[in-house]
Image (spheres, helix red, strand yellow):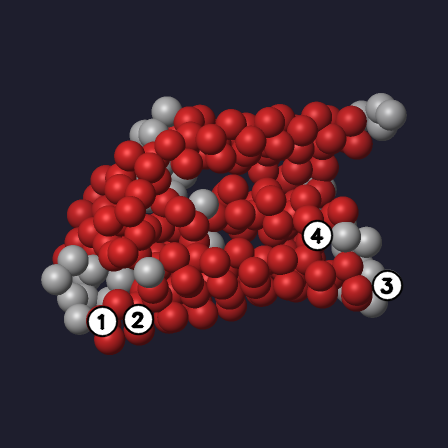
Amino acid sequence: MLEQPLKFFVVFFVVVEPVSLVPLFTGLTAGATRHYKRRMALKAVSVSAVILLLFALGGAAFLELMGISLEAFRIFGGLLLFLLALEMVFARESGTRTSSSEAAESRRRADISVFPLAFPFIAGPGALATILLWFGPLHLAGQAALFGTLLAAAAAVLAIALVLMLLADPLMRVIGVTGANVAGRLLGVILGALAVQFVLDGLRQAFGVG
């Protein structure tokens, strides 16, 4: 009962990468008041929670409506997470999260909570793919307990992201940009291995092997 939620927590934590939000949040809120920073962090996490909950509840039905099998999405989701892992390992600007034009727009916005914090940095393509990969095969009526524990694990990751953003300034003084990059690279290696496993599982299920 605890193995699935624990594994999901690790995967979701690595995908959301709350540590990377620390330098990002510090840069986007430089010179702002404490009240503004708190409001942006709370709003970003709240909006992310709503987006992720909607995908958890209706993602599988949407895929079915579009005629997309879970196996196909598992393969694509694994590839998407693998690209994200490569960007984390090589410390490159994440094209899977935001483009250069979007980054420039975010620096001009007064409200950064929805864009770019909630989407695409917290509830980005990688996080949404992870939600669909884990919640898609579940049947809410028959697996309510597992569904609830997975939601609790996702909520725990969002809570960690919120705490890290609220403590961004003192954390940056302690770990610095280099520390955040080192943590990101280590998490990227783990995510890469998990992404490959998703692809292998999808191929195995699609071709009926094992």
Q: Which residue is mark 2?
A: 38
SS class of the residue under badge 3? loop
Q: Is residue 186 above or below residue 129?
A: above
Q: Is residue 116 visible?
A: no
Q: Secondary structure at mark 2?
A: helix
Closer to viewer: mark 4 or mark 3: 4
Q: CA distance from mark 1 to mark 4?
A: 34 Å
- Left or right, 39 with respect to 208, comes to left
Q: CA distance from mark 4 to mark 3?
A: 17 Å
* SS for callout 1: helix
Give the camera-side residue of 87 and 75.
87
At 64% across and 40% down in the image, what residue appears?
73
- Mark 2 residue type: Arg
Pointer 1 with pointer 2, Cβ within 8 A: yes
Q: Which of the two labelled residues, at mark 3 and mark 2, occupies the earlier sequence position?
A: 2
Query: Element at badge 4?
Result: helix
Which residue is nearer to you in this view: 154 or 59? Answer: 154
Q: Residue at x 34, y 64 (%)?
A: 166
Residue bearing the label numbered 1: 34
Nearer the observer: mark 3 or 2; the answer is: 2
Give x and y (percent) for residue 138. 77, 55
What residue is pinned by disc 3?
142
* Mark in the foreground, 1 or 4: 1
Query: Which badge, 4 or 2, is on the more N-terminal residue?
Result: 4
Q: Is residue 167 above or below residue 128?
A: below
Q: Is residue 162 left or right of residue 193?
A: left
Q: Quadrant of the C terminus?
A: top right
Residue found at x 68% / y 44%: 7
Question: What label sits on residue 5 in the rendered view?
Answer: 4
CB under 8 Å between discs 4 and 2: no
Q: Residues within 10 Å of mark 3 (few under 14, many from 20)?
A: few
